[in-house]
Image (cartoon, rainbow, N blue to C red):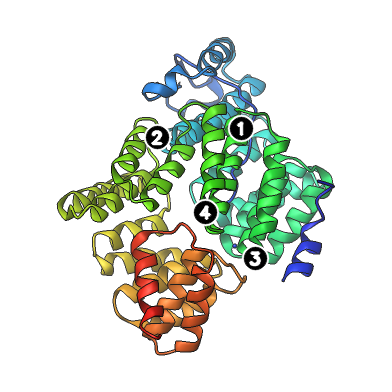
Amino acid sequence: MGSLPTIKFILYMKKRFLYAALSFLFLASTAFVIIKSGSKHKSRQAVSLQLLPRKSSLAYSNEWPKVQKNAAGLLNKLRQNENDIKSLNTLAALFLQEARITGNFGYYNKAVLECVNRVLEKEPANFEALSFKTTVLLSKHLFAEALIVGKQLQEKFPYNAYVYGMLVDANVELGNYKQAIDAADKMISLRPDIRSYSRIAYLREIHGDIPGAIDAMKLAVGAGAPGDENTEWCRVQVGKLYEQSGKIKEAEMQYNIALGERENFPAAIIGLARIATAQKDYQKALSFYMQADSVSADHTIKEGFAEIYSLMSEPGKAKEAAEKNLEHMLSFSKDGNEDLEIAHAYMAVDNYEKALEHAMIEYKRRPNNIEANETVALVYYKKNQYTKAVPFIEASLNTNCKKPELLCNAGMIYAKAGDKVKAKMYLQEALKNDPLIPASLKKESKEILNSWK
C-alpha cells in the first residue's frame, strides 16, 4: 500500500486496553537485587527490584534467556552505582515490557516508578524517565495526570513522535477525541511506524471506519518485527477487527499466525477461544481458556470461563467463575482505578447497585469517554431503568462507533425505552455481518428484531 493519509483527512472523508500501549525494545533483567538508598536520600527505605518468574510455558520462550542475560548486566551495574541513570531507565523499559508479556502490572508498575523516581531525583527533566512515568500513569488509569505530564513533555520535545503517542492515549481515554486526532496526525507526520499506525487504527475504529482500521493495523504489523510482542499484539487486533466484520476465518488465521510467530501468546489463544465459543465447540473453547490462563492473568480469561459454563448450562460453575473474576478485579485494582472493569464484574454476579457505584466513579473521572458512558447505560439497562440509560447510550454513540456490541446495547436500550425506530436501526446495523459477539447478547438482539416481524 502507499503511504497512509493523515488522521484529519481520513476522518474528514469517512465521517470506535483499549489504547495501543507504548512499544518498547526488548531489554531485560533477572535475579534479585537490593538497591540501598544513597546518603543523600536517607529517608528512602531499601527497595528490592526483582524480575518475577514467568508462568510455566512463558518461561520456555526463546526470548527469556536473552531477557535474563541482559538483566544480569543491568543489575550488576546498579550494584556498583545505584544512581546509574542509563541502567535505571533501561530497567524501567524492561519492566514495562515484562508487564505486557506477563500481565503482572501491579508489581511492575511499582518497580518502574521506583526506577524512574530515582532518575528524576537526579534529572527532573529526563525524557525517558518522564515518558515511562506517563506510561505507568496510563496503565493505572490516571489519565488526567498522564495528560499533564504528556503536555509538559510536548513543550520540551515538540518534535518527538513518542510524546504525541502518549497524548493520543491520554486524550482517547479522557474522551478528548478531537485532541487525540490532532496528536495522532502530528505523530504520524513525524514518524510513521508501528506505534503511530496502531493508534490511527484505533481512532478509525472508534469513529466507525472498520475497514480503514484494518488497513492501518495491518500497516502496524508490517512495520514491526515478526514475533515481537508488540507486533503480534497488533496482529491480534487485526483479528478482533475481523471479528467485528463477521470475517471469522480471517480472524482465526491472524490468531494462528500470531501463535506461529510467538508461541503461547495469550491474546491469540483468547481469540481462538472466542471463535470456538461462537462455533459452539465449548470443550475446545475451555481448553483454549485454560491454556491462556496458564500464561496470563488477563481478566477476560475468567470472563470467558463464566460465559462458557453458562452456555454449557452449568450455572454453578458459571457463578463461581464470575465470582472469581470479581475477586481478581477487586484485588488487582487496589493500586489502580479499574472501576469500569469492576462494574462489569459486578454485573456478571447480578450486583447492580455495586456495578452502578463503580460505573459512576468511572464516568465522573472521564465523562466524555464513550466506554464509560456505555457502561453506565448498560447498568441502568440491567436495573430496568431504561429512560436513565438513554442519555448515556446516546453519549457513547457520539463518535459514530460501529462496534457491534455497542450497537446491540444501544438497540436493546432504545427498544425497552420505546423508541422502536432507533432500536431497529442499531440492531440491524449491528447484526448485518453476523459479527462475533457474546452469544447471549446476539440471542437477545435477534429476539427483539424477530418480535417485530
Which dot, 2 or 1, sits closer to the camera? 2
The answer to whether 389 appears left or right of 287 in the picture is right
Q: Secondary structure at mark 1?
A: helix
Question: To which residue does mark 3 refer?
Answer: 207
Q: Name which of mark 4 and mark 2 comes first in the sequence.
A: 4
Q: Amino acid at mark 1?
A: Glu
Task: Tell me the amino acid under the disc marked 4.
Answer: Glu
- The tag earlier along the polypeptide, 4 or 1, is 1
Identified at 36% across, 63% down, the residue is 358
Measuring from the top left, give residue 295's x and y in whole percent: 39, 30
Per the image, the residue denoted by label 1 is 121
Of tags 4 and 3, the one toward the viewer is: 4
Q: Secondary structure at mark 4?
A: helix
Residue designated by label 4? 243
Q: Could you say which quadrant of the image residue 232 lies in?
A: top right
Spatial CA span between label 2 and label 3:
31 Å
Q: Residue at x 55, y 53 (%)?
A: 247
Q: Nearer the viewer, residue 174 or 442?
A: 442
Find disc 2 in the rendering and name its residue.
296
Circle 2: element type: loop
